[in-house]
Image: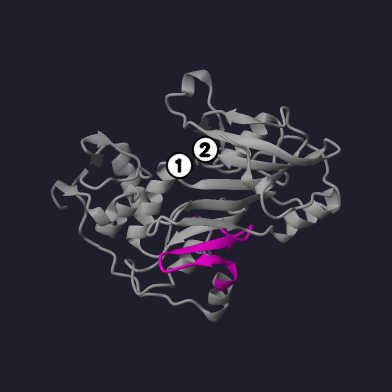
Amino acid sequence: MSGVQHLTVGRDDDGMRLDRWFRQQFPQVTQGYLQKLLRKGQVRVDGTRAKAADRLSEGQDIRVPPLPVAGERPPRPRQGLSPADRDFLNSMILYEDDDLLILNKPSGIAVQGGTKTTRHIDGLLSGLGEDADTRPRLVHRLDRDTSGVLVVAKRRQIAAKMGRMFQTRSVRKIYWAVVRGLPRPMQGKVDAALIKAAGPEGDRVRAALAHEHDDAQTAVTHYSVVDHAAQKFSWMSLKPVTGRQHQLRAHMAILGNSILGDQKYPGHDGELPDAIENRLHLHARRIAFPHPSTGKPVDVTAPLPDHLQKTFNALGFEVKEGKGADDGPED
């Protein structure tokens, strides 16, 4: 076991998640072991307890407890992309420059790996770049069954800058969804703190009770009804102010208008028309932010996936390009 260390966060690591920084510094330590150290308070940032997802700032002091040195994992050989995977990745690209990739993630593919998940966006990205320092990096997440715009940084410094923009809410995100019923009022805000609640169907979140707010995460979503079909189904434009796990799905269920095809937050019962597939109808439609290198506006829109377009056609929802639904509700 090595002794206690105090390491300082460098400029290149500013904005990086603590768990990523830890894996980079100590590749022999697993995520599970790191979580154990964090729960016990043995890893501290500027003398205080920390969480794996905390973002680091340049100059912060990281206390690292004694760590095992035996059995250190050797560097993994770089795995190039197969021609099929390269074609798949290229088919998703909506925008590319020297610093960024913006993808149109299909519904049904995970952003990162996990239990029984071997094919995912992060794995495809690992086939690009010469090593861990030059491979593209995810800067935010989408649920497996959510489609739409996904931002990737081509190097660590850009990822750190993008991380700070997401933290400071300098990134504008617009999602489209089709929900059951017609929300009342037709434009408004859901301000409901969320707390994790594991269950047999996997991780979920729910509205925090009064006595749970100290442990809950603030979550705010602005919403607007773009169109509706006989008050049975509504096309929603959703603007999350915060970026919590399952935030939009949970907030729509809390509002009483669950997103079609959502198996974790099903809300209303009832059969769907034959023309509507029982798949999640949530799409990251548009993202806009100042470019991390030039400051110029980046504004990218993702076309609808096939199942959502079929639902729009069945319900008579017409997408009009330009201003309108893409702008979303205002703060």
Secondary structure, mark 2, is loop
Q: Is residue 149 left or right of residue 282?
A: left
Label 2, label 1: how far apart the Cα atoms are:
7 Å
**Residue at horizontal 69 percent and vertical 57 percent from the top:** 304
- Hey, what amino acid is under mark 1? Arg
Residue 281 magenta-highlighted: no
In this picture, which residue range is highlighted in magenta? Answer: 90-114
Q: Which of marks 2 and 1 is nearer the N terminus?
A: 1
The circle drawn on residue 241 is 2
Disc 1 target residue: 169
Indicate the quadrant where residue 51 lies.
top left
The circle drawn on residue 118 is none
State whether residue 73 is above or below residue 61: below
Task: Report if the CB atoms under discs 2 and 1 are less than 8 Å apart.
Answer: yes
Q: In this view, does 281 lie to the left or right of 83?
A: right
The quadrant of the image that shows the C terminus is: top right
Furthest toward the top, the residue is 210
Q: In this view, does 4 lie to the left or right of 289?
A: left
Q: Percent position (x, y) of residue 155? A: 36, 64
Q: Percent position (x, y) of residue 2? A: 15, 52
Q: Residues within 10 Å of mark 2 (few under 14, many from 20)?
A: some
Secondary structure, mark 1, is loop
Q: Which residue is nearer to you in this view: 3 or 56? A: 56
Q: Percent position (x, y) of residue 221? A: 58, 35
Indicate the quadrant where residue 126 lies.
bottom left
- Hey, what amino acid is under mark 2? Val
Q: Which colour scheme is used?
A: one colour
**Residue at horizontal 53 percent and vertical 60 percent from the top:** 117
State whether residue 216 is above or below residue 128: above
Q: Which residue is nearer to you in this view: 275 or 283? A: 283
